[in-house]
């Protein structure tokens, strides 16, 4: 059996059933063209608009029908699916391999799970009311069919990202939806426009085994308990992957610093114990003279952290992230999940506000945390090194920056492939620029002048995603 190497393209699929997020451009052009019909959808070119018309022709009328109201992305995706299925979309096939093809109705609907899920049934009921106004009652299928469409959409959709790994919408892919989940995945999905590519992050000595390919459905920077709840709530299964089964690893996700200043071992806290329960001893040095107030202080700060993250949602607020980190103080260990989340959001928010010195501090301190939660070969960890490397280069710390960029290069070449925009047009030019600047300094002893328009590191920093 031929060994399959890491970086293998496991799957490549074009979106054929329901284009994601039609009001967002997928190209790099800044000259966007608005649809003259609904004045809502935007396109990066006339060719892009023509290609989108198959999906937009019905939606355009619907958007004008309910103007100035705007339905949610979820409602629009459902409407697109309904129209597409009416026009023969149920016959569209996508090949998984030479012997396996999938159609829309091959996807799991989780009908019984959905019917018992009061939260999602309430959402569906609300959607039905909106869809009636949006599409017209004559275009709506019966309730059983609508539940089947909604269930397949909820459980099988992907959160689509752009070249900078920013979330830009939701898409449904017939063949790519075959992959099961793991919190320590061995494959990773990327997008170029509406095309999804899944690549393996590991070698397969006995050849590729489709049944063992795993991607991650969720952000895995979370506690074992929180991840399991999210997966059960959204996908109706209990995760038993290696990370979820590793209780020892899970205990570190709620942990404090040891009271012994010479010890760096995290001291785990069982969140189910009362505030009065003593802490310790430290698993590293045996220290146990923690203040009786320590557990209560941790619980208070952890609860505050969670409240702030819930309030932020997908938005980034530097002041809120600072407030979380301030309350955590020196109590939280660097691998604690709430500390890592706060560092991560603070870093992204600081970059967004062009506070690069502050961002550098957060990014540097959180590298170990990113490696712990995502894994040392995961592209999210690679992206965190690339982001920090860009900041180092921008601040003139060329050697440190190049070291991080080179580490990121090894990871992202595997996960994204050598032709992906992120790798070919962002990472490689930055690496070459940094190498050239170091060579110039070695020859002349002087730092090269920077041009804001041509400075690869600065242009990269001005985008929050990478």
Image: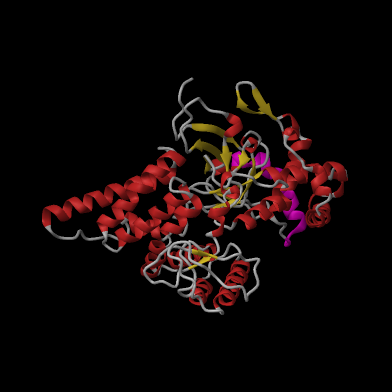
Q: Residue at x 54, y 60 (%)?
A: 253
Instruction: Return the x and y of residue 236 as percentages of the image width and height.
Output: 73, 47
Colouring rule applied to residues: secondary structure
Query: Relative to 99, is 394 on the left or the right?
Result: left
Give the magenta-colored segment's residue range.
50-69
Is residue 36 found inside the magenta-colored segment of the image? Answer: no
Q: Is residue 298 visible?
A: yes
Q: Residue at x 82, y 57 (%)?
A: 122
Q: Quadrant of the C terminus?
A: bottom left
Query: Relative to 39, is 30 on the left or the right?
Result: left
Residue 312 found in image quarter = bottom right
Residue 221 found in image quarter = bottom right
Instruction: Return the x and y of residue 98 as percentages of the image width and height.
Output: 60, 21
Instruction: Return the x and y of residue 340 as percentages of the image width and height.
Output: 49, 63
Is 144 or 21 nearer to us in this picture?
144
Instruction: Return the x and y of residue 405 as percentages of the image width and height.
Output: 34, 50
Is residue 63 found inside the magenta-colored segment of the image? Answer: yes
Q: Residue at x 82, y 56 (%)?
A: 118
Q: Is residue 192 visible?
A: no
Q: Residue at x 68, y 37 (%)?
A: 17
User: In the rendered image of this protein, does residue 370 appear above or below residue 145?
Assistant: below
Dominant SS type (magenta): helix
Is 353 or 117 nearer to us in this picture?
117
Query: Relative to 371, is 36 on the left or the right?
Result: right
User: In the rendered image of this protein, does residue 221 appear above or below residue 297?
Assistant: above
Task: Point out the residue furthest to the left here.
Answer: 444
Is 63 or 354 nearer to us in this picture?
354
Label tally: 0
User: In the rendered image of this protein, does residue 92 appear above or below residue 192?
Assistant: above
């Amino acid at each position: 059996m031929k060994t399959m190497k890491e970086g293998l393209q496991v799957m490549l699929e074009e979106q054929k059933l329901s284009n994601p997020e039609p009001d967002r451009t997928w190209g790099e052009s800044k000259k966007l063209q608005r649809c003259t019909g609904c004045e809502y959808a935007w396109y990066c070119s006339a060719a892009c608009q023509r290609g989108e018309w198959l999906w937009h022709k019905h939606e355009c009328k619907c958007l004008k029908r309910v103007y100035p109201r705007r339905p949610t992305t979820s409602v629009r995706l459902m409407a697109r699916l309904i129209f597409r299925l009416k026009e023969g979309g149920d016959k569209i096939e996508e090949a998984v391999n030479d012997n396996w093809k999938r159609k829309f109705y091959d996807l799991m609907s989780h009908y019984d799970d959905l019917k018992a899920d009061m939260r999602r049934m309430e959402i569906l009921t609300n959607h039905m009311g909106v869809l009636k106004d949006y599409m017209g009652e004559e275009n709506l299928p019966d309730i059983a069919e609508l539940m089947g469409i909604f269930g397949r959409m909820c459980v099988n959709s992907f959160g689509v990202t752009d070249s900078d790994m920013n979330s830009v919408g939701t898409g449904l892919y017939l063949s790519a939806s075959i992959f099961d989940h793991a919190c320590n995945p061995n494959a990773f999905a990327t997008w170029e426009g509406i095309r999804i590519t899944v690549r393996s992050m590991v070698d397969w000595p006995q050849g590729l085994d489709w049944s063992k390919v795993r991607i991650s459905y969720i952000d895995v920077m979370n506690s074992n308990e929180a991840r399991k709840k999210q997966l059960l709530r959204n996908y109706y299964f209990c995760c038993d992957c290696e990370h979820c089964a590793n209780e020892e690893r899970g205990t570190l996700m709620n942990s404090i610093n040891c009271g012994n200043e010479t010890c760096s071992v995290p001291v785990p806290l069982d969140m189910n114990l009362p505030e009065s329960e003593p802490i310790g001893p430290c698993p590293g040095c045996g220290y146990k003279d923690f203040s009786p107030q320590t557990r209560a202080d941790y619980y208070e700060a952890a609860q505050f952290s969670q409240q702030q993250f819930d309030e932020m949602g997908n938005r980034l607020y530097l002041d809120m992230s600072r407030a979380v980190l301030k309350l955590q103080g020196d109590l939280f260990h660097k691998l604690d999940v709430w500390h890592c989340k706060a560092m991560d959001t603070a870093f992204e928010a600081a970059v967004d506000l062009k506070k690069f010195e502050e961002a550098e501090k957060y990014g540097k301190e959180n590298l170990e945390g990113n490696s712990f939660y995502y894994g040392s070969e995961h592209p999210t960890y690679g992206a965190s090194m690339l982001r920090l490397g860009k900041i180092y280069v921008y601040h003139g710390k060329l050697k440190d920056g190049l070291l991080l960029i080179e580490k990121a290069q090894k990871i992202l070449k595997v996960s994204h492939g050598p032709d992906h925009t992120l790798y070919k047009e962002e990472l490689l030019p930055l690496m070459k620029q940094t190498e050239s600047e170091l060579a110039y300094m070695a020859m002349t002893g002087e730092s090269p002048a920077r041009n804001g328009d041509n400075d690869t590191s600065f242009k990269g920093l001005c985008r929050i995603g990478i």
